[in-house]
Image (cartoon, grey):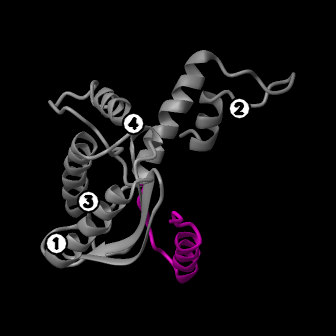
Amino acid sequence: MNNPVRVLKKLFGLAPRSRGRPRPCAFRVKLQIFLYFYIMSDNFKIKNKEKAYYLTLTTVGWVDIFTRVNHKLLIANSLQYCIKNKGLVIFAYCIMPSHVHLICRAEGIQNLSEILRDFKGYTSKKIIKQVQEEPESRREWLLEYFSKACSHLKRKQKHKVWQDSNHAKEIISTSFLYEKLEYIHNNPVQD
């Protein structure tokens, strides 16, 4: 049986040659990119439903939507609703211009993935409604951008505000928790 490390090195063009390091071919480069995203997508999933996670919920294209007070209040109020009604336990959070950082876990009937799905679905609809109905200098651009962001999806939907991933990292140690707490508390949007 072959050593898996040698097989991967050979596959990715990293096997030693008599004249230095070989150049990876286009197929190998594409395969490297595919495997990187395939492996990385699995690394940031919520696997253990009882654990706390550090999450980054990001808008599509990193659009700065949370620069407006009404959008930030929507996020804060929606998180409060999830705490009271869905079993979300938040240890820390920070609303940045294009994303939200959370350290949280779920208690109760719904798991964390379900709560985040509902949160994103609700806030997406409300953000679009706010952009359409309230004063917004970037209204046309935002609506067009969020519309184009879902044009490739199979399911019918008019706008997409959030990226699919939650970039979930399980809180595995006290030092990791303190590192993320410090990052969240030193990184807020200034008003």
- Amino acid marked by disc 4: Arg
| CB contact under 8 Å: marks 2 and 3 | no
- Where residue 14 is drawn, which disc sits there? 2
Q: Earlier in the sequence, mark 4 or mark 3?
A: 3
What residue would you read off at disc 4? 138
Q: Earlier in the sequence, mark 2 or mark 3?
A: 2
Whether 123 is drawn above or below 112: the answer is above
- Amino acid marked by disc 1: Lys
In reply to whether residue 41 is colored magenta, the answer given is no
What residue would you read off at disc 1? 86
Q: What is the residue that sits farthest to the right in this orientation?
A: 19
Which residue is more in the foreground, 69 or 81?
69
Q: List x then y, in percent, for residue 107.
A: 22, 78
Residue at the spot x=28%, y=61% of the render?
74
SS at mark 2 in the image: loop
The crowding category of the residue bearing disc 4, from other C-alpha atoms within 10 Å (few below 14, some 14 to 19, many at least 20), is: few
C-alpha separation, residue under disc 2 versus residue under disc 3: 40 Å
- Where residue 116 is drawn, which disc sits there? 3
Whether 32 is drawn above or below 60: the answer is above
- Amino acid marked by disc 3: Leu
Magenta region: 167-191
